[in-house]
Image: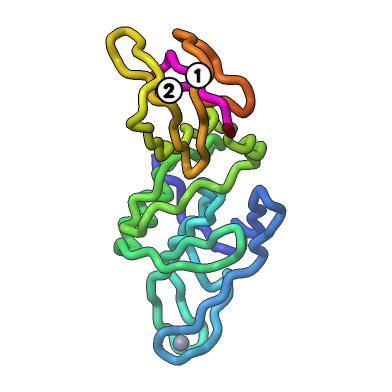
Amino acid sequence: MMLPKKPLNQMLPVRFRNGEQIRQFSKPCVRCGHMLNARDMRGAARLIDDHLAISVNARCPQCGESFGVACIVDNQKRVRRVLVPALLFGWYLRSLPPQRGEDGRMHSGEPAEPAPAMELPEAPAAQPLAPPAPQPRDVERAEEAVGRYQGQPIPAWVKVDGQTFTFERVAPGGKPRPGEFLLDDCLIYRLGH
Ligand SMILES: [Zn+2]
């Protein structure tokens, strides 16, 4: 069921959720430039998704020109033209159910407006999931062997990033203490000579 066309001034003011209000709507006459106000316009004005959609026929009291006005006013009172013909847009607005709960999207040919920003709690700062991987270290093995372990020679010393470690003990799966270096997961070297 279509709502009847009404003078626009009877549909104002319209209040947005942020408290802004549209009390008056004016538009210069396309022919003579006389400033028309809401009293000179008839049609439909609906609040949809916190945007005021207006589709009216304006009639200039000065020169008698009549013309369509179709636009959307956002809750900052910025006015945008609607690119579908005013007739269709007005039909669309007046065919919407008169009750609240207006979640309909405008099929206006305009890009959809992003939803109002929601107050979201600040995302917690990202926690590193794992400590950074150890840097690959530059390990130089001595040619001189002090023995063999599981068939492999045990280098007498190793140079790790320029620091010399001397062989200390065999420790399969051992954990190096401070000042020690674990080679091949089984040989412990100690810093210094
Ligand atoms: Zn005029």
Gap between marks 1 and 2 measured at Cα: 6 Å
Residue 38 in the image, given as x and y percentages of width and height: 57, 69
Give 99 or 151, whichever is nearer the viewer. Answer: 151
- In this picture, is 124 found above or below 116? above
Give the SS element for disc 2: strand
Give 52 or 132, whichever is nearer the viewer. Answer: 132
Q: Which residue is mark 1?
A: 188
Question: Is residue 115 found inside the magenta-colored segment of the image?
Answer: no
Q: Can you tell which quarter of the image residue 146 is in?
A: top left
Q: Can you tell which quarter of the image residue 67 is in?
A: bottom left
Residue at the outermost right position: 19
**Quadrant location, the C terminus:** top right
- In this picture, is 40 found above or below 165? below
Give the side of residue 143 with respect to residue 122, left or right. Answer: left
- In this picture, is 27 found above or below 149? below
**Residue at (56% x, 19% y) in the render:** 176
Residue 135 in the image, given as x and y percentages of width and height: 45, 38
Give the side of residue 189 with respect to residue 109, left or right. Answer: right
Name the kind of residue labelled 2 in the image: Leu
Give 122 or 179, whichever is nearer the viewer. Answer: 179
- In this picture, is 178 found above or below 85? above
Name the kind of residue labelled 1 in the image: Ile
Residue 191 in the image, given as x and y percentages of width and height: 58, 31
Residue 81 in the image, given as x and y percentages of width and height: 41, 68
Give the SS element for disc 1: strand
Q: Is mark 2 within 8 Å of ligand 1?
A: no
Q: Which residue is mark 2?
A: 183
Highlighted range, magenta = 182-191
